[in-house]
Each structure stands twice: as C-alpha cells, then as structure tokens.
Image (tube, rainbow, N blue to C red):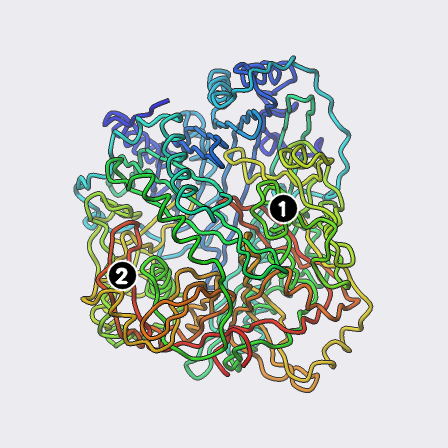
Amino acid sequence: MSHRIPAALRAPFSAEGDAPIDSHLANKLLELALEGGADYADLYFEFRVSADYVLDEERVKTVGRGITLGLGVRVVAKNATGCAYTEDLSWEKMAHAARTASQIARSGKTLPPQGFTSQQLPNYYPVEELSLMVAAPEKLALLRAADRAARAHDPRIIKVEASFAESLREILVFTSDGVRATDLQPSIRFGARAVAEQAGKRQSGSGGGGGRYGLEYFADSTHEAAAHGVEAARVAVAMLDAREAPAGEMTVVLGPGDSGILLHEAVGHGLEADFNRKQTSNYSGQLGQQVASKLCTVIDDGTVAHSRGTINVDDEGHLPQRNVLIENGILVGYMHDRLSSRHFGVAPSGNGRRESFRSMPLPRMTNTALLGGQDNPEDILRSVKRGIYAKRFSGGQVNISNGDFVFALLESYLIEDGKLTTPLRGVNLIGNGPDVLRRVDMVGSDYRYSDGMWTCGKDGQSVPVNVGTPTVRIASITVGGTQV
Amino acid sequence: MSAEVTLENVAALRALAAETVELARKAGADDVEVLVHDGSELSASVRLGEPELVQEAGSRGLGLRLQRGGRCAITYTSDLRRDALVALCAETVALAELAEPDDAGAPPDPSELAKDVPDLDLYDPEVGKVDAAWALRQALEGEDAARAYDPRVSNSEGATWARVIGVTAFATSGGFVGGYRSSYASLVVQPLCDDPTDPTTVKKRNGHWWTASRFLAELEPADEVGREAARRTVRTIGSRKVETQECPVVFDAEVARSLLGSVFSVANGSSFWRKSSYLLGREGQSVASDLFTLVDDPLRPRGPGSRPFDGDGLPTRRNVLIDRGVLTTVLCDVYSGRKLGRRSTGSAGRSIGGSPGPTTSNLILSAGTQTLAELLAPIRSGLFVTQMMGMGFNPVTGDFSRGAIGFWIENGELTFPVSEITIAANFDDILHRIDGVANDLRFRSSVASPSLRVSHMMVAGTSK
C-alpha cells in the first residue's frame, strides 16, 4: 500500500522520506553502540501520526492531531541492557544516544558489523484506504450516527459521547545480528458512551470496536457506528434495573468474545517469558504440566487478520506466529522476546513488543484466546441452577507472582434455573489463575474474538491487544458483590 | 552523565511558548494556549545483584490548543524548530474548521490569569547530578538490604532508582506566560519469596516499598527501603481466603490513598457536568463521616503534586473538597466551571496534546488522633487491607467492588495474611461508615492519607 500514502504520513526515515536511514548509516550507529563491547544492539526508528475526534453534547468539540518521531537505541551485554532515545534524528543526537546506550556494556566482546537482510513480510492488515487519508467529514458523520442512534434508542438516554481515533505507526528496526525490518501499522478505534436516567438514578454504558482497518470496518452491519451507539445505550438502560450482586463462590458463565480478558489475566501475563526467565511467575518451571482443565487450549496469535493485537513483524524484527500456550490443559509454551528466547534456547515467538521508541521491548501478548469446545452455548446456560452470566467487562489485573487476578464486570445477569433473569450492578470477580482454569468444566463451540477495544498495560507500557473466547462455564469462582 | 536545568533554560522555554502563541495568532487563531516541556530522565535497575537496565534520555514536547470562531483544535509535536512550528500552527488553524463552536471553550478572562509564579521550591540541582553508576549503587543497596533481611527472600523483581528533571512553560494569548523547573527522584525495591504453605500449588509472594521526593536529601536511605520492602513481602507468606462475611475493614495508610482518588473522580466539575458522578446535587450536604476532611493543596513547598499555576494559567489555591463530611468544593477547571455556571477553582491540569481538565495536586486527607493500633483495638474480627486490585469503582452509581490483600484481625491484633478476596459496598456508604481516622499521615506522595476504619463492608471469599 506504500505507493498510495501521501508524504505527510510517511516517516522521514523511510526510503520515501526526506531523511532516509539506509544500511550504511544504521551500521555506523550500531558500531558506536557496540563500541564498549557488547553482545547485541538494535536501533528502533518510529514515526506515528494520530488523529482523534470527540463528539459531545451533539457537537464535535475537539479535533486533535499529533506526530511522534524518534529513535530508540538498545545495547545488551549478558542480562544487562542500556538504552537511550532521541526525538531529534540529526547525526549528532543519534550518535549521542548510541554512545549513551553503550555505557552499560561490559562484555569486552566486539562484534564485526554485518550486512542487513530484509525479510519479505506478510501483510495481515491490508486496508483499502488509510482512514487518515479520508476527509474528516466522513468520520464526523460516523460520530453523529452513533450519537443519534444512541439517543433514539431510548428516551431515558440523557447524555451521549462518541469518539474516533486513528493512527498510522511506521517502524524501522536494525539489529546487530543483521535483521532489517519495516512495517506500517494502521489502527482505528471507535467508542460510544451513554448515560441513562430514570427516577433520579443514573447508569452508564459503552460500546465500540476497531482494529487494523480503514473505514471499510464500518461496512459490516455489526460494526456500524450506529450499532456501537445503540450498544452503549442498551447497556446503560439495561443497568437501570440492576440490583446488587451476590457475594461469595458461585458458578459463572462467561459470554463469548470479550470474556477473553479472563484468559489474558488468568494465564496470559503469567506465560510472558520474562517473568519465567526470572522465575517470578507462578507458571515458572511448569512446562509440560497440567495447569488447566483438559477442555482448555489457549493460544496467542499475532497473525489474526485485521485484529487489534496483530503485527506483521514484532518490534525486534521477528515474525509473529500462532503460538500454542496451553494444549488440552498442558502448559506447552511461553511468549518470548529476544532476551527470553535466548535464555530458554528456543526460537523467538514474535512477542517482543514496545509501546514506543522510548520504552524497552518486553514479551507481550498479541491476540490471546481460549479455543472453542464441544458444548452448545445454550446447554451451558441451561446447566446452571443459580449463577452469574458475565457479558461485558471493564478490565482486569493480575499479580504475576501468585497468580491471583481480578476482573470487573460491567454487564452481568443472574442465572436462575438456566435462564438469565435480573441484571446485576458492577462487580469484581477474583480468582487464582491455575485454580480457576482447572474449574473450567464446559467450553462452548461459539469461539470468537472481541471487537478490538483492548489495551494492555505492563511496566508502564501500553500496547494494543485483542482477546477471544467461546462461552465458558467456571464451576466456581468468588463473586465480589454485597448480598449474601 | 549529570544534567541540569538553569534559570536561562526556563526563560528560553517560556519565550518559546510565548513566540508560538504569536505564530498561531498570525496563522489566524483567535485564542491560543501553548504548553512546552523539556526534560531529562535517568532510570537504573538492578536484579539479583547485577545491573539490569540503564535508561537515559532527554525528552521534549509542545502542545498547542487554539480556537478560531469558537472552534477548537489540539495538536502536539516534538519538533521545536521554528519552521516546523510555523507549519504546525497553520495546520492546527485548518484543523479547527472541522470542529463545531463551543461557547464554554473560550479562554479565561485575562483578569483571572495568574499575575506571578510563586517559587514553590520544586527543583533540587542535586537530583540532576546523579549519574548512572551512583543510581545503580543505590538500587543495589536497596535490593541487597531486602535480600539480607530474611532468608525467605529468595528472588527479586529488582530495584530501580530513577529521576526526572525538567522545565514546564505555558503561555496564552490572554497574556499569561509562566515557567518553572522541577525535579523528582525515587527508589522502589521489589523482593519475592516462595510460599511453601501448600506444597501442591507453586505460589510466590511479592511486595514492594518505595521512597520518592523532589529533593535528593529527603529520600529515605536505600537500605531502609529495602528492609521495609522485605518485611512487607515475607509477612504475606501463607496468605489464604476467608469466609464470606460482613465485617469492619481497616485501610492501611498506603492503600487508603486509592480511596481518595476515587473521591476526586466523583468530586470534580467534569464528572458533574457529564452527569457521571453519584455526588451530583449533593454540594452542601453530608457525603462522608464527620471524621473526613479532604483538602487539595497545590501550594505546598516541595510538594510532589505542587504547581505554581494551573493548566488554564490561573493562580492555584488550596481547596477543601470535603469539610468534616460535608461536600464543600467540587474541583473545576475553566471549562467545567462554565458548564456548571461557576468559576474555576484553579484546578486545571493539562498534558501535552490534551485538553485541560480538573486534576488534583496534593490531595490530602486530614489526620485523626488515634494510633493505628487504637483503630484495630476494638475489632473482634475484621479485615486489615494493605493492597487492592482491579478497577471496580463506578463513579456514576458509586458501586465499589475490588480485590483485596491484607491481614485478618482478631481481638484487635493482626493474625494471618489473607488474599484472593473482594471487598464491596456502595461508596456513599463506605465514606459515611468511616468511624476512625489514624494519626499516621505522611507526605510521601501527591495523594496522602492516614489509615482509616470503615465500620462494615462485605468481604467475599469462600462459602461457609
């Protein structure tokens, strides 16, 4: 798609840019970085253009735009890393960053400079036209459509906000072991929020989606801007009748898609190999062991077409892939960055990701999912005499070392005699990762990914991810409500 | 490498902000606000006695917010060259055409703008003099002390010593131009130990402790931070669930800070005009126990959250949000104040590339008179919370449900550690049920709280 992108959206350092970084220049910088003697060094050039539009009180209130440009230099000597970055791509500033990063290196080794090999990358997110290239009125019309649809959905809706964010990130990576990789990563994210009021009581709801798409994303009927507006209004109105949730251990049925956040927290983070290299995860040393019910097969797949967590190449120049983490309950693999794959003596898994040139690559999830099983989703619901059906989530958190995790339900319902009855007010679930996954006793056939809204935080770095799951029954988990 | 921010640097950045305001006016903007930041950071981490990461860099950015015909656009860049800024101004003016007029978005009346910038003593030149080698030694000393404290500390998530120094400058077309320099240094130590309590399940227990200050000499000694981190880690060995029940809950000073953040999220002008606060319409009424007095004070000398002017260019001032239980002030910036038909409380925060909005500076819950032991003493059985997990607070309804870690209280004494439980109640009830505030307030961070006791909450754990 590169030939169709206007110059304003291309990185200055790209071959088409006004200050291209070629192999010769990259080699000179890597030589400086390795001057003190080190095992490895890499250069990470990043250019990001983003725009956002916010509609509030039926008006487009702000329009924003930003550009980020910089170089991150990393030098590795054994397990120690030195890094520096610069937002100024003049030779002096780049050379200064390279020398600063080299200050930690103590290995005494000197590496001969190498030539770079560029890989032919797959493209998991071809777009018809970048949304940043489309004239703004078309995007503002999407915001108005969501706003109108949310208001029209129910007279109890008293407030609606809609937002659209779009970005294009261009990266260029050079490594001292000879890799050169470049990628253009488009992303869009649409969100709607509604507040409903009835007899002085208020509730809010939200809807949205996105991924690595152009505006063709909205052509799918479930992705229409109006559909996201209606979803926000539907949740807000549904929650007006919500009553307080129960407290204590109960059976919980997770709805398909969004509930993958449970996997993300319960096992995903614990299987990021930096924690296991350092023996700080509760999954450390558990390879080959049963860590979940036999019904559970968990993957992390960076190659899902157009998904929010997908990448054509990771931020260390490695190809993404479909990595099986847990197969029929047995732990079979971790997610690696370069450092951890070296440590474990395995091939890189394509999970080395960084928020920006200012941060360090870490093993990170991409699109993490529990694969579908044999059960009919309706049978799963019917099997529960009394429990909770979890439909929408606001997020979660895990303690890596002991595996305890929480996730917050935004929309959930009481299940009584196999049927959804009362909506419940916001509540947290808490459990222990391996413990909860051993209690997964029914897995539905309706596996799907969430509609692209999730962002994962780790060590202060945010990266886009996606989660997926079918309908799942957990025999028992602690529900943090107020009613005994 | 050491770094330094001189008064000349401050003057230069102030001038850059003011010049950019003029460039944007020439480009056709009616009203302009420019925020510029230029800083330098150093971060040094060790793990198991070896250097793990040293990061050192300078970082800068300029945020431009302008209006034309009441239409607003916001842009940012890290390219501060004059021709780049000229282009940015033209682009931003064009971008504003896409927005729709918003009367509330006009800048403050020039008469409201801050006339001078008080010196709040926010910069310590000693912080910038620290180099990577010294920072690594501090981190090492902290981690060593943690590992030596108890043989059960068998592993570590490392220790990090970090600093930032920099200049912030802000200029508006209304005539405000201000700038100041600031510094901040911190050390965090994160030990880890194995928990052999249940041999069938591998569990590890982690904990951390930290020190931070704008002044190097005010940091707590690294070895003390390390020992406190280790003490907080090993005491969680053997953590277990408790039965679901309603009981008194005492929040440790460190974790009570999180409750104050939740109070702010429902006591600010933005959540009010967005009808997204359960406190809407409750000003002048009781919203908490009369033991509860909450103040936001941006003018504390050396305060971690102090600021000499706010994100609208207004002078900052001390505001009492809740006075002995009564909601007295909702923190407003200019925009949210207008939406509510009132004046700003001088509480605007603003980031590069962001819209201004109400934020806290130093948010402080007034100390009580009892010791922590006295808070615990009357409790026959209850929960002492030292950490919370997750985001289980809904500002619209006040529903509060979060994961909790801590200790079980029996007859006024801490007995065994607990984890994997939740605590829940409506936040309005939580604030009214506060029946004890301790005297252990310390100004370690921009949100500071003493320990406090809530008469009862629902604790969810195992079934009976």
**What residue is shown with label 2?**
B450
Instruction: Specify the amino acid type for callout 1.
Output: Glu
Neighbours of disc 2 within 10 Å: few (<14), some (14-19), many (20+): many
Instruction: Specify the amino acid type for callout 2.
Output: Pro
Residue A86 in the image, given as x and y percentages of width and height: 48, 26
Residue B150 in the image, given as x and y percentages of width and height: 42, 47
User: Above or below — where is A187 with respect to B162?
Assistant: below
Residue B62 versus residue B154: which sits nearer the camera? Answer: B154
The structure residue drawn at horizontal position 39% and vertical position 68%, both measured from the top left corner, is B415
- Disc on res. A272: 1
Q: Quadrant of the N terminus of chain A?
A: top right
- Can see residue A57? yes
Neighbours of disc 1 within 10 Å: few (<14), some (14-19), many (20+): many
The structure residue drawn at horizontal position 59% and vertical position 74%, both measured from the top left corner, is A412
Residue B427 versus residue B34: which sits nearer the camera? Answer: B427
Residue A30 in the image, given as x and y percentages of width and height: 58, 18
User: Above or below — where is B195 with respect to B148?
Assistant: below
* Chain under numbered label 2: B
Is residue A12 shown left or right of residue A255? Answer: left
- Can see residue B272? no
Residue A97 in the image, given as x and y percentages of width and height: 48, 22
Q: Give how far apart the Cα atoms at labels 2 and 1 are.
A: 37 Å
